[in-house]
Image: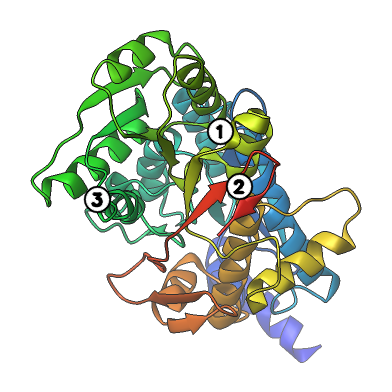
Amino acid sequence: MQRREALSTLGSILGVSAMATWVSPARAQSAGVSDNVIVLGQSAPFSGPAEQLGLQFHLGAQLYFEALNAKGGVNGRRIEIKRLDDGYEPDRCAANTRQFISDDVFALFGYIGTPTSLAALPLATAARLPFFAPFTGAEALRAPFNRYAIHVRASYFDETAAIVRQNTSTGINKLAVFYQNDAYGKAGLEGVTRALKAQNLEPVSTGTVERNSVDVSKALGDILAAKPQAIVQISAYKSCAAFVREARKRGFAGSFYNVSFVGTQALLDELGRDARGVVVSQVMPFPYTPITAISGEYLAAVKAKQGRAANYSGIEGFVAAKVFAEAVKRAGRNLTRDAFLAAVEGMGNVDLGGFPLEFGPGKHTGSRFVELTLLTEDGRIRR
C-alpha cells in the first residue's frame, strides 16, 4: 500500500511520462515479447511452384515449437510464428516484411529463398530485427557480415564445392549448369564456377529458367549442345524436374546434381521413376532414420503428429527452431533483441545431437556440413 502511494506521489510530481520511464526497466523487453509469448514472423512460399519448401520448413519448425510450448515454452514463454505467403516473389516478401515490422514481431524466422531474403534483409537490418535461419545458402546474405543475419545451414559455396569435388575426383570434368535466372541461381552458378576454376576448369555450357516457370526448352538446347558429362541444377523442384524429364527424352544419360534448396522430397515426388541418376547435396542430418540423436528427436516428433512425413525441408525447420529456442533460453527472462544476438554469439561450439554448430562474435554461420544423397527410381533417398 505504501509503495503504491509513493509511486502515485512520484507520478504527480514528475508527470505521467516520467512515471512511465521510471517503471519501464522492470519490463525492458523487446517488441514481440509479452509475459508469456514470443512472436516471430515468417514470409515464405505457401502457394505456387515452390510452396512445398515453405510449407515443409514451417511444419518442421512448428513440430519443435509446439512440443516445447506444451512443456511451458522457454523461460515461461511460448514461441509462436505468424506466417504470410509471398509466393517466392521478392516484392511480396518485402511487403510481408514491412507488415511484420509494423506488427512488432520479435524476429524474422525461416524466410525461404535467396531473392526474397535479399529483399527482406535490408528492412530487417534497418529495423534492428534478427533475421534468423533463412532457407538459403547465398553468399550475398553472409558477406559482408551483418549482425542481424544468423545462418544455421552451410552455404551454396560449400555445397557446390562438394558437388564439383565429387565429379572431378571420378574423372568427370565437363560440367554444365542449369540455373534459375535470379539471385539464387546466380549464387549457385558462382559457386560452381569458383570450384571449377580452382581446378583450371569452367562450365562447358549454361542455361537459364525464370523463377516460378517450367519453360526449360531453350536451356535444354543451350546446355546439351556442349555434350556435358553431368549437369548441376540451381533451381526449385518443379523446373528441375521438368529439365530432367526433357533431358532424358533427348537422350542425356549423365547425372544431375542439385543443391539442397531444390527441396529433395518435393523433387523426388515430381520425378517419380525419372529420379534415377539425380543427386542432391544436403546441409542437414539424414531425416529418415535415427542415425543421429537430432534425427531421432525429429522423427519422434513427426510420428507424434498424425499426417506428417519426414523430409529434409522439415528437419531444417526443426533444427532452426531448436537453435532459436536455445538462444532464447540463454538470453534469459529479460528478453531483448540485443540479448538474443549476444546469446547466439555466446554459444560457441554446440552439438544438437550429432549436428555440430559453432557461433561467435563475427561468426553467424553455424554449420558447414554437406553430404551428397542419391535419389532412386523406386522413390528412396540414399546416403
Q: Is residue 278 left or right of residue 265?
A: left
Q: Few, some or many C-alpha atoms within 10 Å of disc 2 (few <14, some 14-19, many ≥20)?
A: many
Q: Disc 1 designates what residue?
A: 96
Where is residue 185 drawn, in percent x and y? 35, 32
First-in-chain label (2 vs 1): 2
Tag 2 and tag 1, C-beta contact below 8 Å: yes
Question: Where on the picture, by quarter, is residue 56?
Answer: top right
**Residue nearest the observer in this picture, 284 or 330:** 284
Q: Nearer the viewer, mark 1 or mark 3?
A: 3
Where is residue 57 drawn, in percent x and y? 64, 48
Where is residue 27 drawn, in percent x and y? 61, 73
**Residue nearest the observer in this picture, 371 or 151:** 371
Q: Few, some or many C-alpha atoms within 10 Å of disc 1 (few <14, some 14-19, many ≥20)?
A: many
Relative vertical location of residue 5 with respect to residue 262 in this rendering, above or below: below
Evaluate whether residue 178 shows in this view. yes
SS assignment at label 2: strand
Evaluate whether residue 23 shows in this view. no
Q: Disc 2 designates what residue?
A: 41
Identity, as a three-letter code, of the amino acid under mark 3: Thr
Q: Disc 3 designates what residue?
A: 168
Identity, as a three-letter code, of the amino acid under mark 2: Gly
Q: Is residue 350 left or right of residue 71?
A: left
Q: Is residue 51 left or right of residue 194?
A: right
First-in-chain label (1 vs 3): 1
SS assignment at label 3: helix
